[in-house]
Image (spheres, coloured by chain):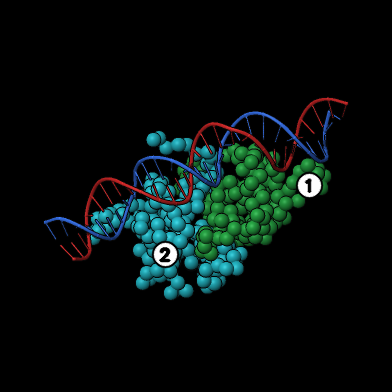
Chain colours: A green, B cyan, C blue, D red
Amino acid sequence: MPKKSLRSHCPVNFALEAFGDMWSLLILRDIIFWGKHSFKEFQESKEGIATNILANRLSKLVSSGILVKSVDAVDSRRSIYNLSKKGLDLIPMLCEMSAWSTIYDDKTTAPKEFVEKIRKNRTAMYTLMHTVVKNGGSFFVGKNSVIENL
Amino acid sequence: MPKKSLRSHCPVNFALEAFGDMWSLLILRDIIFWGKHSFKEFQESKEGIATNILANRLSKLVSSGILVKSVDAVDSRRSIYNLSKKGLDLIPMLCEMSAWSTIYDDKTTAPKEFVEKIRKNRTAMYTLMHTVVKNGGSFFVGKNSVIENL
DNA sequence: TATAATTACTTGCAAATTGCAAGTAATTAT
DNA sequence: ATAATTACTTGCAATTTGCAAGTAATTATA
């Protein structure tokens, strides 16, 4: 199908058309914060995404250049989804979103050091996360996780 | 109806449940960037929101404490929607979203100074916008608009 | 002062999207 | 050889959306 034209080139609208639905953002969260990379792992997240929707969102994120899909070298059944540069550049937005919720949700599961660190030096935090995720890590999971360096 | 419980207290999910749908975000954009405040003005935006959806989203944003509704002093037909503190605190997120699109949409309508300014000193930009919008202004429109101070 | 506009909605209904359950195809593990 | 696992697809009911057409309460105009 031919790529349908945008309703507008307003930057907020552009972002919404690329990744602005609930499930796409939860997939990005799973990668950035939890180091998930496969269909199965995304499916196991507690919000409970349906498999047809998950397949649909993954293919949209790949075709908009935010995710890159590859086949696992040791298990060819597995597809691996990683963030491209374009996807890594969404880290600041996800961080601000999370920081907001951490302030306004009194039952938040986010660590308080996260918001403190962001308030002190946002750009440093974004840069650190960009590097960690680019190298296969994530905020919470992985041997070079962000949280153990806070 | 009793307030339905959240699927999770993950900060990304919390944000999505509060304002994470396309139309809610476009309403927030209209207020922050274009200084719109009434039903009619939101309806006129070029993305073309249907009036039933607009009414629904405005009432959700009010009940989640992001918007505050009041009646216009000089024309009692008009309802006026303003950002609460909780709403003003979404400015950083909207800015990062816009900054991302400005980089990746080669037809973006965003001014390039915006992204430059954010890269140089994000926090200063957020603070300026917070103040301007709090005082009834916006990024583009109003006598104390942000853009004329870039 | 009667009539026309305007503003902020609501209602009804068709069309699109979602959510759920159940497959399927291609590996990999036992 | 058989069972699991992984990444999907399919069918269908239920929910949500989009569109057109109201309605009610002002405010503006002849």
Image spot of residue B141 (x, y percent) = 40, 68
Q: Position of residue B53 (x, y in %)?
A: 43, 49
User: Marks 1/2: CA distance?
Assistant: 47 Å
- The image quadrant where one finds the N terminus of chain A is bottom right
Vertical placement of residue B12 versus B27, above or below: above
Q: Which residue is mark 2?
A: B34
* Point 68% across, 45% down: residue: A36
The chain letter for the residue carrying disc 1 is: A
Q: Is residue B65 shown to the viewer in this render?
A: no
Viewer-side residue, B20 vs B45: B45
The relative height of residue B80 versus residue B11 in the rendered view (above or below) is: below
Which residue occupies the foreground of this view, B55 or A123? B55
Give neighbour class at mark 2: few <14, some 14-19, many 20+ (Cα, 10 Å): many
Amino acid identity at mark 1 = Asp
Image: B148 above or below A47:
below
Chain ID at mark 2: B
Q: Is residue B105 found left or right of B76 in the rendered image?
A: right
Residue B113 visible from this viewpoint = yes
The residue tagged 1 is A72
Q: Residue A17: horizontal and vertical position, in percent? A: 56, 56
Tell whether label 2 touches label 1 (CB within 8 Å).
no
The kind of secondary structure element at disc 2 is helix
Which amino acid type corresponds to the residue marked 2 in the rendered image? Trp
